Amino acid sequence: MPIEKARIIDDGRAVDLTWTSGEKARFHALWLRDNALDGATRSANNGQRLITVLDIPAASRLSEAQVSTNGDLTLTFMPERKSVTFPAGWLVNHIYDRKSAPNAGWVAPEIETWDGGLAAKTPLIAHERGKTDRRAFGHWLAGIRRYGFGVMTKVPTTSGALIDVARMFGFVRETNYGMWFEVRAEVNPNNLAYTNLGLQAHTDNPYRDPVPTLQLLACLENTVEGGESVVVDGFRAAERLQAEDPSGFALLTRHCARFEYAGSAGVRLKSKRPMIELGPDGELIAIRFNNRSASAFIDVSYEDMEGYYAAYRRFAQIIEDPAMEITFKLKPGELFIVDNTRVLHARKAFSSSGSRWLQGCYADKDGLLSTLAAIEYGQKDAA
Amino acid sequence: MPIEKARIIDDGRAVDLTWTSGEKARFHALWLRDNALDGATRSANNGQRLITVLDIPAASRLSEAQVSTNGDLTLTFMPERKSVTFPAGWLVNHIYDRKSAPNAGWVAPEIETWDGGLAAKTPLIAHERGKTDRRAFGHWLAGIRRYGFGVMTKVPTTSGALIDVARMFGFVRETNYGMWFEVRAEVNPNNLAYTNLGLQAHTDNPYRDPVPTLQLLACLENTVEGGESVVVDGFRAAERLQAEDPSGFALLTRHCARFEYAGSAGVRLKSKRPMIELGPDGELIAIRFNNRSASAFIDVSYEDMEGYYAAYRRFAQIIEDPAMEITFKLKPGELFIVDNTRVLHARKAFSSSGSRWLQGCYADKDGLLSTLAAIEYGQKDAA
């Protein structure tokens, strides 16, 4: 979209732009200078900035603003007498001159919250297709970005195959549980996950900071009765809590909870983070919820503690509402992945007859989102 | 410290305790019930909680409070008619009934901020001693927890030795740069780190979310002129900014910055996080600062942008103040570790004659802090 008009305002401190579409926005001289795209400001090799904020004169002003025939913008910065061209499309994609900030609890536009109705739309891919069809793989990853949940089928039922799946998009986060861990009923379990008890919907390892942002669970054997897997969108649960009880929502975001794990020798993990984490701009960025590893909350004031517990209880009720759940029974060769900062998973109790053998591992979202962005960027290039 | 007196208050909703030391605190019935330490509430095996918040009656009240002869507290919860004993020491360690919340920008008590004067107190250990002397190793790790910085000497100068160092306390965070990466001047670098340019003090990979929380840099060869390493305590810099310019500090905490890296094929990382991150309770928890990978800030309002840039500039000036720096030149066999959520590192430019070969890797604080806590716990047990 070309720029139609550029007008220097505030004694050269900013420029006021109008695009041919009618869109309008102001940009500051300092911001523009810092984000100049020329070869002396940004490395042509790798895109990194070559200057620091201290290399930019504090008194930077615009002395000239010209719209070229193709609608791009050329600015002259004083006192450097430096002339820089900004593509019209780049500027429209980086507008920060907006009317109002969103309310606390907003989610990013690439995210869609869900309840049990998502089941039919679960992002699904077969292992071999994910390996060979880049477009289909990108589509699956985009589904995981959107819903925080996805399923892969026809995964080899060999031990450790989930590590190869994680490496299709990123890197495994090794922990005290290993590169991967066995989820089987054990006699002396160091974690209740390694029993045949049901587990309340939870996020994994909230006692770790940084928390692992992705979890993969692959099924190798499953002939027990029960043992169904359940996933719940923690972001939807937080939205429901906020709608029903705004002050309870505020309490869970404003106060830190505490979590800990010391179930094995040599391991004493603990963290202090809120159950519902907002960014400084109110964006909903993470859920931590785990009855097994919650430790005593000592960062909530005496005055707020009863309200905090009431909100915690209501949040748990929403999470356990069957309307929120997708329930499925993993078959050998099936693997599911969750965004562990958002989607809770649960397990129903299972019989001691038969065998149930899952393997789990952790990974991080940065790798997944980077791989997805690179696929999308390649497709845009090819289009 | 024994309890002297226990008085049920608010119709059984809470109990008011006085210790023999004169310390006083109130605890709610709901909180106490949730944190009961009996075998039906907590697994004796692994310490995990066996019940969920929904298993606790919302109307839980205390009907009886008795101080035993050793000063511990036994409570009876209604309507469950459940009797639970709480050690006096456990309760005093978990008091949440406090007068007032600290001001924004506070740091945890186990942290001490520093300027260049720390140089003489740098946590230091020889590789072999770290391997063989558990107490000395714990002391070194405690120094890293306190200062976010430590040095190891006499590390084998074999390629990849830093991975073994990371495994002494935790786990490597593999990324697109590999399990570890070579820091050497290259002809077509995909990152300015791989040149002989100076690098402004920065935290690594702020474009990654979660950011790697520890970085290790080991020296294998260093015969160039220049190339000194510099470290700066970002928490101290934030404290200085807050003292000098509280509203600038608030702007850097309240608005998200953006970071990105797309220097290699198949990699497009980006993040949206503040330069100075506070917990919801105002605790200073992370610094992100990197001129090379900062992208256009589009989450700051038009009205705040000039103030934001002024604060960013002032923060950079404080970070570059020589009084803030520890400067040293790594010798072969020396390795330094920084808390990458807190301590910035820089490199001075170096000559093209001679060779400078470092290797770097990332790891996470949860593993380091867990290993340290286990060592400290073992020492307490032995004491």
Image: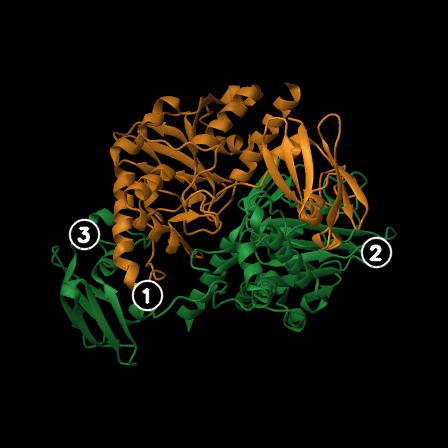
Chain colours: A green, B orange
Q: Amino acid at mark 2?
A: Val
Q: Residue at x 36, y 61 (%)?
A: B299
Q: Crowding near pointer 2: few (<14 within 10 Å), some, many (20+)?
A: some
Q: Position of residue A24 (x, y in %)?
A: 28, 75
Task: State whether residue A118 is above or below residue B182.
Answer: below
Query: Which chain hosts label 1?
Result: A
Q: Nearer the viewer, mark 2 or mark 3?
A: 3
Pick the quarter of the image with the C terminus of chain A: bottom left
Q: Is residue B232 left or right of residue A291?
A: left
Q: Which residue is mark 2?
A: A224
Give the distance between the C-alpha atoms of the residues marked 1 and 2, in whole angstroms: 55 Å
Q: Amino acid at mark 1?
A: Tyr
Badge 1 or badge 3: first in the primary sequence: 3
Whether labels 1 and 3 share one chain: yes
Q: Position of residue A317 (x, y in %)?
A: 69, 61
Q: Which residue is mark 3?
A: A58
The residue closer to the viewer here, B162 or B311, is B311
Residue B165: in sight, yes or no? yes
